[in-house]
């Protein structure tokens, strides 16, 4: 008797499954197709991104080789192309390197690139800070002291990565402007920071000696 009931139960389950398949079978097939297509699309996208990154890496190394060879115009052009075509990480680095190469002969264009990077919220904060400091350093020989100070003072705080370079550039700009008080203020800040690199410390000690001698003459 139990076998009969078991056969009836199995028949009922088959009928239910058949009805469910008739009602939802095409949806299940469609979902499987979409899943397979999504996985395939993601793999194709991942392969494309990996290929682009590898190509950008090769192009970046080639551009850097121009720098080593002293071919700075070629390097600037190669980095400019990368900054337009490469994946985002390489684009940022290429823009920084392009500006560095341009700075050798065209400070105005280099500063424009640095300023654009510094104002771009999609660029990591440390790279924005670096761009700000490099722009200020490029302008030390030509811009008024107040402009240099305004540009670089935000980068001189104790928690800023490039504070030593920013402080030294402000001190140099103050010396060029013959502002003895400002030279002393920024030099004291540099020398009192125990983390100041030895090279920067030595440069500032020389700058202070020059400033003191000029003040006495």
Image (tube, rainbow, N blue to C red):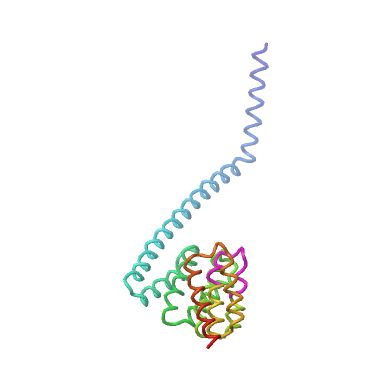
Query: Could you say which is closer to the camera, residue 212 or residue 46?
Result: 212
The residue located at (56%, 43%) in the rendering is 29
Whether residue 128 is visible to the viewer of this picture, yes or no, is: no
Q: Residue furthest left?
A: 69
Does 74 appear in magenta?
Answer: no
| 173 over 155 or under it: above or below | below
Residue 70, image quadrant: bottom left
Q: In the image, 12: left or right of 58?
A: right
Residue at point 63% right, 41% down? 24
Please name whichever residue, 15 or 43, is drawn nearer the observer in this view of the structure: 43
Q: Residue at x 38, y 65 (%)?
A: 59
Quarter that holds the N terminus: top right
Vertical placement of residue 212 versus 165, above or below: below
In-front residue for pair 108/142: 142
Please tell me which residue is depicted at 64% across the width and 19% down the height of the picture.
7
**Is residue 160 located in the magenta-colored stretch of the structure?**
yes
Whether residue 210 appears in this view of the structure is yes
Q: Position of residue 40 (x, y in %)?
A: 48, 49
> Of all residues shown, which one is farthest toward the front?
216
Image: 29 above or below 123: above
| Most common SS among magenta residues | helix
**Which span of residues is magenta-colored?**
152-166
Q: Position of residue 26 (x, y in %)?
A: 59, 43
Q: Nearer the viewer, residue 184 or 25?
A: 184
Q: Position of residue 36 (x, y in %)?
A: 51, 46
Most distant residue in the top direction: 1
Does 173 sit left or right of 55 as displayed? right
């Amino acid at each position: 008797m139990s076998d009969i009931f078991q056969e009836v139960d199995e028949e009922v389950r088959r009928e239910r499954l058949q009805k469910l398949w008739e009602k939802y079978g095409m949806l299940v097939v469609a979902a499987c197709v979409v899943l397979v297509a999504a996985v395939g699309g993601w793999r194709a996208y991942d392969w494309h991104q990996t290929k682009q990154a590898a190509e950008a890496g090769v192009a970046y190394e080639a551009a850097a080789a121009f720098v080593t060879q002293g071919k700075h115009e070629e390097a600037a052009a190669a980095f400019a192309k990368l900054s337009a075509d490469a994946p985002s990480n390489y684009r940022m680095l290429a823009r920084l390197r392009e500006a560095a190469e341009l700075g050798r002969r065209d400070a105005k264009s280099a500063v424009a690139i640095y300023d654009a990077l510094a104002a771009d919220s999609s660029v990591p904060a440390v790279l924005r800070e670096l761009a700000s400091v490099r722009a200020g350093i490029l302008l030390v020989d030509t811009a008024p002291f107040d402009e240099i100070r305004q540009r670089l003072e935000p980068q001189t705080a104790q928690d800023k990565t490039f504070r030593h370079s920013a402080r030294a550039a402000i001190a140099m700009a103050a010396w060029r402007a013959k502002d003895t008080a400002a030279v002393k203020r920024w030099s004291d800040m540099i020398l009192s920071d125990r983390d100041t690199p030895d090279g920067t410390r030595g440069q500032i000690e020389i700058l202070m000696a020059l400033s003191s001698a000029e003040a006495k003459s």
